[in-house]
Image: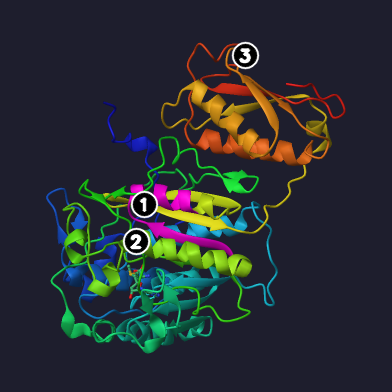
Amino acid sequence: MPSRKRKRTERPAIHRRNRYADNPPDFSRLASLYPSFSNYVFYSRDGRARIDWTDFNATRELTRVLLHHDHGLNWWIPDGHLCPTVPNRSNYIHWIEDLLASDNIPKTSSVDDRVKGFDIGTGANCIYPLLGASLLGWSFVGTDITDVAIECADKNVKSNPHISEFIEIRKVEDAGIVYGGGVMQLSDGGSEEKDHQRSRRCSDLIDTRNVENFKVTNSEDQLDNGQLMKGGDTAELDEILDGEVQQQPSESADGHLTADKSYFGPSILLGVVKDGETFDFCMCNPPFFESMEEAGQNPKTSCGGMPEEMICPGGEKAFISRIIEDSVSLRDSFRWYTSMVGKKSNLKFLISKLREVRVTIVKTTEFVQGQTCRWGLAWSFMPPARKLVPSHVAEKTNLSFMLEAFQRQASAFNVLESARSFFCDLGVACKSNPSSFTIDISMSNDHFPELCTATCLSVFRSLSRSGCSFGERICTGKRESSFGSISINFPAAGGIPQT
Ligand SMILES: C[S@@+](CC[C@H](N)C(=O)[O-])C[C@H]1O[C@@H](n2cnc3c(N)ncnc32)[C@H](O)[C@@H]1O
């Protein structure tokens, strides 16, 4: 059985624009500058300054000094709340920055040209709005459901007057939306249990510590292994969907099959986004788990935070499914919908859900967080940007595409087959020839050349990033260095061969 472990060099690392990519936090220096932090720093035998990642006070103090020292931010959270790690949270911000900068979907112009984000579940720490506003000048609406989160987030915003005008903290009020086939009517102000849960204060601390360790490496790899998967109306994610898509039931962290559950909590986007509001993106670090037991299941998985920060009915699968459902209604109110995902099996499920609702694009990335991996999932309903192809490319009747950045083995046949089905999905007649490793495509003049060439480039970029690799046998003739190449024969406009 092939090892499930990736080679170290293949692991996605910290985003290249993350300020800690080349300069990991220097605990020793921070300790010399911040006496309050020095209390938590000790030196191991190799002389390296360390902190105890299982000590909530130590990690909170580290986050506090990093935000202060490197970002000029004043910040605090009450005991026991989810304590974010600055380098990790910055990766998500930079990934969104990449999405916004990409030309996959057209840019929209806002009144003041300021990027406008929506942070679902901003938490007491309010980390994403604070980082987004201070690093990139973005404005934010940050939402949450608990009083304590709203109060603390508000305090964190007000402690930073230089960016406070760009951040609105919005309490999710029950919006009267009936979820899950009418099981829960939210306009009644909620049940006693729900009210109780939401008004929990710091006194309800649970004995968990924030140990969401981060590992900052000096890798120069960019954390941008997202997949471009544009295809007509549906999205294709080769890296994720290369096996069978796990539909229901799905596998839980302990390997048991669980039935899918609906989200019965408070509103998420619908009813919280105001009429006429538009945003460049939404982001979310969802409550990943269904129960605190599940949160503590994996000893390697760091978990910390209040129950309402960590868990929700149905876990992240239900929560993000709800975001997807809301996005179907809100559609172009957001250029990009994004969320973090904690389990790969859930990622697969969510991608298949996105295909069902016919998003125009899906992107994923992988975030390395200490010992654990999380994924970023992004989608949009906006029509993809039309890419114009230079005339000298359009005139060619045979285009070669280089597949590079191989990450794992995939048979040449699978690659060819994926490409063929991609074109079929576009409604283009095509036929693959495994021996010559070519795909013959018949298309009308409407398709050719811009649209098809652009989508070809997209699919091959996608294939290459999914780590396709070819067997020697297939890579004849077209071989360049250690990479394989695929030729697609484009008929010249006007001379379309029949397949
Ligand atoms: C895992 S915490 C994330 C906190 C912060 N964004 C971070 O990354 O550290 C999830 C947050 O979502 C909030 N939450 C749960 N359901 C929500 C909903 N329907 N709308 C908004 N926030 C919600 C929780 O109260 C909690 O603060």
Indicate the quadrant containing the C terminus: top left, top right, bottom left or bottom right.
Answer: top right
Ligand 1 closer than 8 Å to label 3 CB: no
Q: Measuring from the top left, give residue 95's x and y in whole percent.
A: 49, 56
Q: Which mark is residue 316?
A: 2
- Relative to residue 141, is residue 448 depicted above or below? above
Q: Quadrant of residue 339?
A: bottom left
For marks 3 and 2, the one nearer the N-term is 2
Report the residue marked by disc 1. Answer: 346
> Residue 282 in magenta?
no
Secondary structure type for disc 1: helix
Inter-mark Cα distance, 3 to 2: 45 Å
Which is in the foreground here, disc 3 or disc 1? 1
> At label 2, which amino acid type do we have?
Glu
Q: Which mark is residue 436?
A: 3
Sequence-first tag of 1 and 2: 2
Q: Check disc 3 and give the amino acid type.
A: Ser
Looking at the picture, tell me which residue is in the foreground, 418 or 213. Answer: 418
Magenta stretch bounds: 335-353
Kind of residue at badge 1: Asn
